[in-house]
Amino acid sequence: MPQIKILPPHVRNKIAAGEVVERPASVVKELIENSIDAVSTDISVEVRYGGKRFIRVSDNGGGMDREDALLCFRRHATSKLSHEEDLFNIKTMGFRGEALSSIASVSKMKLITAPMGTSRGVLIELQGGEMSEIRDSPSAGTTIQVEDLFFNLPARKKFLKSNRTELLHIIDKVTEEALAHYEIGFTFTSDNYGTMHLPDASSFRERIMQIYGEEFLEGLTEAHAESEDIRIRFFISKTDNFRNTKTHQFIAINRRPIRDPSISHAVYGAYEGILPENKHPMFFLFIEMDPRRVDFNVHPTKREVRFEDKESVYRFIRNSIRDFIAHPPRPVSYESPSASVVSESLELSYQPSPSFLYLGESFVAISEKKGLTLIDQHAAHERVLYEKLLKGVDLASHALLFPRQVKLSHKEYMIILEHRSVLRDFGIEVDDFGHNTLVIRTLPDALKEADIRDMLSDIASCLLEGTTPLSNLRENIAAKMACHKSVRGKMTLTQEDLTKLLSELERCINPDRCPHGRPIRIFFSLEHLNKIFKRK
Ligand code: ADP
Ligand code: MG
């Protein structure tokens, strides 16, 4: 009796679904990419319950006739490839013909579609991949609705995270696709957080601005470079605008959002010597290259790529960005160009003063009777403000005469609204203005000069990524706020200010470490100095 049997199609589909459909966000990605391939100019995505119970993607693309609509759920059914050679010259987002069959096999799906130029459409319903209804239905473009994902794969369903976490993954995918396809209009609606509406744009720049706002874009610098077989347009952190986390790092090759550690590494390489420790650049890279030199058929979700010549892609990216950073375009003014930011900040400025001495921008050496204290003034400020925020003392909060509008990315906006009450505890009143915009109505005096947009965005990314060592939410937020206020700008204190800072520091619960754990002050006793200089 033979032991080996060929698996029946519904089992094969479920296995394939395991690779293609990891979570609701994978469904959203596949459906959007199909709409893109159908040459749509407008794509709407609606999700409920983090996409677990409901996902709907509608487009105004080419649509399908009845025959194709019946075929598209079959495994390896695709209109995008016909010959083996096509595999090495892929110009569409899809080509494997397995997304719809996989998604259909693990959900309840509804397809309504009509071919361009007619409204005579068809509606097809499936349950776990089995067709349950086919009828005529007037329509334009294509709408695919996916309900109860993994209803027939309970083991898989259990692995899904909370609705909120799944929603965040979905927003990431929609944002990535929208970044890579600026000429397409996107509308994204979720049951909890309103709508993100991105009208069709005329450039990558405009799309980045639609998503993140003008202020965000001002922190980036744009350039492009090309060689014989590769072109790149990039938007990268200005040299004074690094982040504490790896958020806002995006790579697309031939309009396909991808992840590639070696390309990310190339960008970090370009910033070598400029990027402070523990800081990360933001980057948006839009790379175009001959499709024959890059293989997307590495992984079912097509997020990883293999290059024909990885080394040269790496070098091209690193060198183009590095050259650009080293020789930024001349300022428009005729005035003499100022020294670059980098050399300016590396220079140590010694400012002798009766009892203390500045070393660089932040270190202050203070002579004491029994030795010498070195203090990091920014870290000291950070600690003082952090403890004030947590204790709620000295935090006079004032209504702003001109409330400030701050535009954030959809994800940041969502997360800040969720934590509105914690911000209120710290004297920050935030109102929802819709369209990913918040209105800041009150601010504590201590934060009046902080860059609020940057601060909120930083708070959002730390809440999302949980990268700080502090486990408590209030502590996390307070640490971020304190850091924003204290790190920005050069600040030389007068003797009086310094005395005040030192006495405030003395009253802190932990005067020796900043909220991130870095040292604030180091004391060298005369005894210790004697030892160092081998006097004893
Ligand atoms: P692939 O995208 O790899 O071809 P899919 O399973 O995602 O495989 O889709 C199968 C086929 O269904 C596509 O090749 C395309 O012909 C058709 N199709 C899917 N979605 C759409 C859509 N939104 N509009 C028009 N045709 C579509
Ligand atoms: Mg597809």
Image (tube, rainbow, N blue to C red):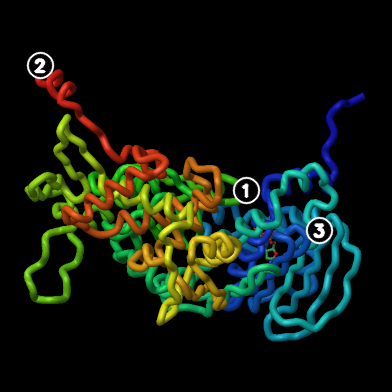
The answer as to whether callout 1 falls within 8 Å of ligand 1 is: no
Precedes in sequence: disc 2 or disc 1: 1
Type of residue at label 1? Pro
The image shows a total of numbered marks equal to 3
Residue under the point 19% across and 27% down: 525
Residue under the point 46% across and 62% down: 456
What is the C-alpha distance between the residues marked 3 and 1?
A: 22 Å
Does residue 239 lie above or below 183 as drawn? above
Mark 3, Cα crowd under 10 Å, few <14 / some 14-19 / many 20+, is some
Q: Which mark is residue 534?
A: 2
Classify residue 180 as left or right of residue 73. left
Which of the 4 image quarters holds residue 372?
Answer: top left
Does residue 56 lie above or below 283 as drawn? below
Residue nearest the observer in this picture, 213 or 421: 421
Q: Which dot, 3 or 1, sits closer to the camera?
A: 3
Precedes in sequence: disc 2 or disc 3: 3
Mark 2, Cα crowd under 10 Å, few <14 / some 14-19 / many 20+, is few
Does residue 286 lie above or below 512 as drawn? below
Write down the residue under mark 3: 148
Query: Can the viewer see residue 32 in this picture?
Result: yes
Does residue 62 lie above or below 239 as drawn? below
Type of residue at label 3? Asp
What is the C-alpha distance between the residues marked 2 and 1?
A: 66 Å
Write down the residue under mark 1: 300
Task: For mark 2, give the secondary structure.
Answer: loop
